[in-house]
Image (cartoon, rainbow, N blue to C red):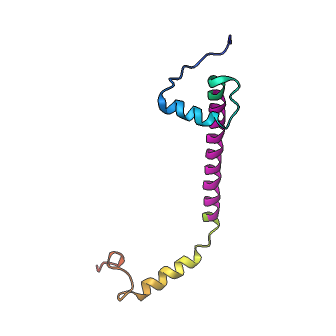
Amino acid sequence: MPTSHPRVQVTLDPEFARAVDRAGAHLDSTHGRAGLIRTLALRGAEEISRQADSETQARARAIEELLAYDFSQLSDVVAKRESDLPDGLPPSQRPRPT
């Protein structure tokens, strides 16, 4: 079919052919394999974009939760743990005698 758009050649190796055939069982394939491959490419691009957006949103939520976390209790836990040590601080943090 004539077109003013550039064309792309795709090698239909056995693995790719099986994937196209599997998808063809669930999608409209009235435009043949070329139309089916175009549909798969468009849907795949949309899905990849959706997943990337979802991952970005999940990272943003995690950062927001981390920034909202009250770390003041953590310093109490650390102080309690350090006070439970025989010499107060672990050897690497003890002041050196001068």
Q: Nearer the viewer, residue 33 or 85?
A: 33
Displayed quadrant of residue 34: top right
| Quadrant, the C terminus | bottom left
Displayed quadrant of residue 87: bottom left
Magenta segment: 38-65
Residue shown at the point (65%, 58%) measured from the top left: 61
Q: Nearer the viewer, residue 81 or 42?
A: 42
Query: Where residue 83 sits: x, y (%)?
Result: 43, 87
Q: Is residue 15 above or below residue 60?
A: above
Residue shown at the point (62%, 36%) measured from the top left: 23
Does the segment drawn in magenta span residue 60? yes
Query: Where residue 48 sits: x, y (%)?
Result: 61, 41
Q: Is residue 31 above or below residue 59?
A: above
Q: Nearer the viewer, residue 51 or 84?
A: 51
Q: Is residue 45 above or below residue 9?
A: below
Residue shown at the point (67%, 30%) measured from the top left: 39
